[in-house]
Image: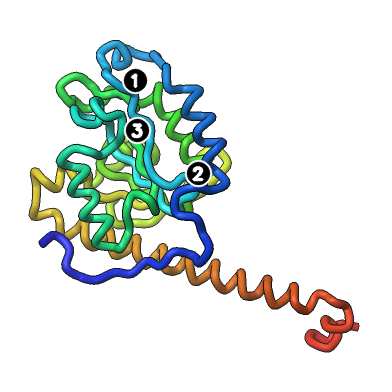
């Protein structure tokens, strides 16, 4: 099997899995761009493919562009590569209700070719706005197209994968890691061991974020319980 270890990513207690504070804003934004015909890709498409998953997710996965099945269903990663992505998510105890998934380009390129630089440049503002609304703590770039769109064309996936960087995207600044696209892993199965390393790094980063958030919430609750001046004086020797 691709992934053998057991990983547990427990959600924050009380956090909604599918509906949250970002849903209305995200749906309003997606509705505003669903009829976009910015380039020739829109002329040959069946459906626009925007995103799917939890609009309040801490983790966002970004791929390249829709394929045939995605174009038919209007959802990202529903073909063969999507099935592998589901296995990758399941390996770290995640699923599509706990993450958000999108692509750099929202229409299927003819014959599943790689999007051109011009097409990427036209659709990148949409992706950036997508990310800004969701405000994830972790952004996973699947493949070289997503990597080059977000980080820059001077880097290659084989050298960039498995490394954390933090970069500002509009007004948000998620931690970013690149890994291989599931479609590439199907063509090069020997690279799955490196993808597994990347997934374990994502697991550890996510665990750290949960621990920090939990500690912060405990501290806030403690301070709130001691909000009375008399209590503060007794607890912290405030004069």
Q: In the picture, residue 67 is in which quadrant?
A: top left
Placement of the N terminus among the 4 image quadrants: bottom left
Residue topped by disc 2: 134
Q: Is residue 98 above or below residue 220?
A: above
The answer, for residue 154, to whether it is visible in the render is no
Label 3 Cα crowd, 10 Å radius (few <14 / some 14-19 / many 20+): many
Disc 2 vs disc 3: Cβ atoms closer than 8 Å?
Answer: no
Q: Select label 1 or label 2 by which is in front.
A: 2
Q: Give the mark nearer the N terminus: 1 vs 3.
A: 3
The label on residue 101 is none
Instruction: Give the quarter of the figure containing the C terminus.
Output: bottom right
User: Which numbered marker is on residue 104?
Assistant: 3
Question: Who's the residue at 53% across and 63% down the image?
Answer: 14
Instruction: Indicate the position of residue 60 as horizontal and vertical percent values.
Output: 40, 47
Disc on the earlier residue, 2 or 3: 3
Calculate the distance from the C-alpha at mark 2 to the C-alpha at mark 3: 15 Å
What is the distance, in whole Å, between disc 1 and disc 2 at their CAs? 25 Å
Q: Residue at x 8, y 55 (%)?
A: 190
Q: Secondary structure at mark 3?
A: loop
In the image, taking residue 203 as reference, residue 71 lies left or right, namely left
Query: Residues under labels 1 and 3: Cα distance?
Result: 12 Å
Nearest to viewer (mark 2 / mark 3): 2
Estimate the x, y position of residue 142 in percent, counting from the top left.
28, 44
SS for tag 2? helix
Q: Give the residue displayed 45% in from the left and 29% down from the top.
A: 126
The answer to whether 53 appears left or right of 13 in the picture is: left
Task: Give the mark, 1 or 2, whose residue is nearer the N terminus.
Answer: 1
- Residues 149 and 80: in front is 80
Q: Which mark is residue 118?
A: 1
């Amino acid at each position: 099997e691709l992934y053998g270890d057991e990983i547990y990513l427990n959600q924050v207690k009380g956090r909604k899995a599918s509906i949250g504070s970002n849903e209305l804003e995200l749906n309003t934004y997606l509705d505003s761009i669903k009829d976009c015909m910015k380039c020739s890709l829109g002329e040959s498409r069946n459906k626009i493919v925007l995103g799917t998953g939890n609009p309040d997710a801490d983790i966002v996965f970004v791929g390249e562009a829709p394929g045939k099945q995605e174009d038919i269903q209007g959802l990202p990663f529903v073909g063969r590569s999507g099935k592998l992505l589901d296995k990758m998510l399941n390996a770290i105890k995640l699923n599509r209700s706990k993450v958000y998934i999108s692509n750099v380009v929202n229409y299927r390129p003819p014959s599943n070719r790689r999007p051109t630089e011009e097409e990427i440049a036209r659709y990148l503002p949409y992706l950036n706005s997508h990310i800004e609304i969701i405000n994830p703590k972790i952004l996973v770039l699947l493949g070289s197209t997503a990597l080059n769109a977000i980080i820059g064309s001077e880097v290659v996936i084989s050298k960039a994968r498995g490394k954390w960087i933090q970069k500002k995207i509009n007004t948000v600044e998620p931690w970013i890691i690149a890994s291989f696209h599931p479609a590439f892993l199907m063509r090069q199965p020997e690279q799955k061991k490196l993808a597994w390393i990347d997934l374990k790094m994502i697991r550890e980063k996510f665990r750290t974020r949960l621990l920090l958030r939990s500690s912060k919430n405990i501290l806030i609750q403690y301070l709130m319980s001691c909000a009375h001046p008399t209590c503060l004086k007794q607890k912290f020797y405030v004069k």
